[in-house]
Image (cartoon, rainbow, N blue to C red):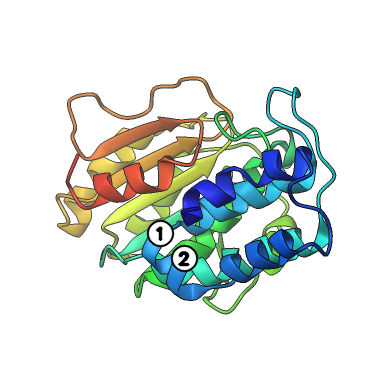
């Protein structure tokens, strides 16, 4: 069975009893999940492995019709596969600023399109992807102001989550990353803002803040992606500007769509 199909069907195979603790099939599944060559060949993104892990841990399908008892060694193998799969991600070569909303609401509910994973976990995982694959990156936590975050390529998921949770924040202003970069003369090719459904802004609209940043920095093709992880729809991007992109929800296809946008392919 191909790797992607195996991961996708772990829940069902456990539910119907095909996978039972300590049987041969479980051992084979765990070996495959820890096989770097198989993971690389399947080009599996870390976020998709994390999504599978959180779904498997939950013991129930998104619609609640399928239930199972998670097998601990499979859960551990999925966690190992998550960290191994970072090597599969190819860098964009762009200078990134990743801005994370660290408000309490990021820990409530699941992402639209990925209900088994909470927004703060999804954004932390995507921060790890950036830290481990891109050479030039800056991480910030934002609300009505900006706080720099120290996230590096050696940190595990729980460490990134701890770093984010230690910051006390107020209301959300999605223009702050561009304002901060302009004020500090930072060279940024792409701003990625992760929030839940709070896409509020203050006196400066985010798309205007990006335009001002472009003019100030001379990086006229600087891009902005705003991800509203629990939103069913919002409008921040200027529809006439090909360098701005709004993403409502966050599912398994989202990381690749974002990458294609950053590279100018869509």
Identify residue for label 1. Answer: 42
Q: Is residue 28 left or right of residue 108?
A: left
Label for residue 195?
none
How many angstroms separate mark 2 from mark 1 (CA)?
Answer: 5 Å
Q: SS of the residue at dot 1?
A: helix
Q: Residue at x 65, y 71 (%)?
A: 156
- The residue that appears at 66% across and 47% down in the rendered structure is 10
Q: Position of residue 47 (x, y in %)?
A: 53, 53
* 156 relative to 14, above or below: below
Q: Is residue 95 left or right of residue 130?
A: left
Looking at the rendering, which quadrant does residue 40 occupy? bottom left
Tell me the quarter of the image containing the C terminus: top left
Of residues 4 and 125, the one nearer the viewer is: 4
- Residue underneath mark 2: 39
Kindly check if marks 2 and 1 are in contact, taking CB atoms under 8 A apart as contact: yes
Residue 207: x, y in percent? Answer: 31, 34
Above or below, comparing residue 232 to residue 57 in the picture: above
Q: Secondary structure at mark 2?
A: helix
User: Counting other residues with Cα less than 10 Å from the Cα at mark 1, is it few (<14), some (14-19), or many (20 or more)?
Assistant: some
Horizontally, residue 184 falls left or right of residue 252, namely: left
Q: Nearer the viewer, residue 109 or 30?
A: 30
Of 89 and 44, which appears nearest the observer? 44
Q: Position of residue 54 (x, y in %)?
A: 70, 47
Within 10 angstroms of label 2, few (less than 14), some, or many (20 or more) residues? many
The answer to whether one can see residue 154 in this image is yes
Q: Position of residue 226 (x, y in %)?
A: 42, 38
Q: Residue at x 61, y 53 (%)?
A: 50
Pick the front one: 23 or 117: 23
List the single residue furthest toward the bottom: 154
């Amino acid at each position: 069975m191909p790797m992607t199909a195996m991961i996708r069907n772990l829940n069902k195979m456990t539910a119907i009893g095909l996978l039972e603790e300590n049987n041969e099939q479980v051992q084979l599944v765990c070996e495959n999940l820890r096989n770097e060559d198989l993971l690389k060949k399947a080009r599996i993104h870390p976020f998709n492995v994390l999504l599978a892990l959180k779904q498997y841990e939950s013991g129930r399908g998104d619609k609640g019709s399928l239930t199972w008892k998670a097998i601990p060694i499979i859960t551990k193998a999925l966690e190992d596969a998550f960290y191994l799969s970072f090597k599969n991600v190819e860098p964009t070569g762009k200078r990134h600023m990743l801005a994370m909303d660290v408000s309490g609401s990021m820990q409530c509910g699941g992402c639209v399109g990925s209900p088994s994973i909470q927004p703060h976990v999804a954004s932390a995982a995507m921060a790890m992807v950036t830290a481990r694959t891109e050479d030039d990156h800056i991480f910030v936590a934002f609300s009505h102001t900006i706080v720099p975050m120290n996230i590096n390529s050696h940190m595990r998921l729980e460490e990134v989550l701890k770093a984010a949770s230690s910051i006390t924040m107020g209301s959300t202003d999605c223009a702050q990353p561009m304002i901060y970069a302009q004020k500090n003369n930072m060279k940024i090719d792409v701003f990625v803002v992760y929030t839940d459904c709070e896409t509020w802004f203050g006196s400066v609209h985010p798309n205007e803040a990006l335009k001002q940043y472009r003019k100030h920095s001379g990086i006229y093709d600087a891009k902005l992606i705003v991800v509203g992880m629990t939103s069913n729809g919002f409008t921040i991007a200027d529809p006439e500007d090909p360098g701005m992109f709004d993403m409502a929800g966050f599912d398994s296809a989202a990381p690749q769509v974002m990458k294609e946008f950053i590279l100018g392919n869509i």
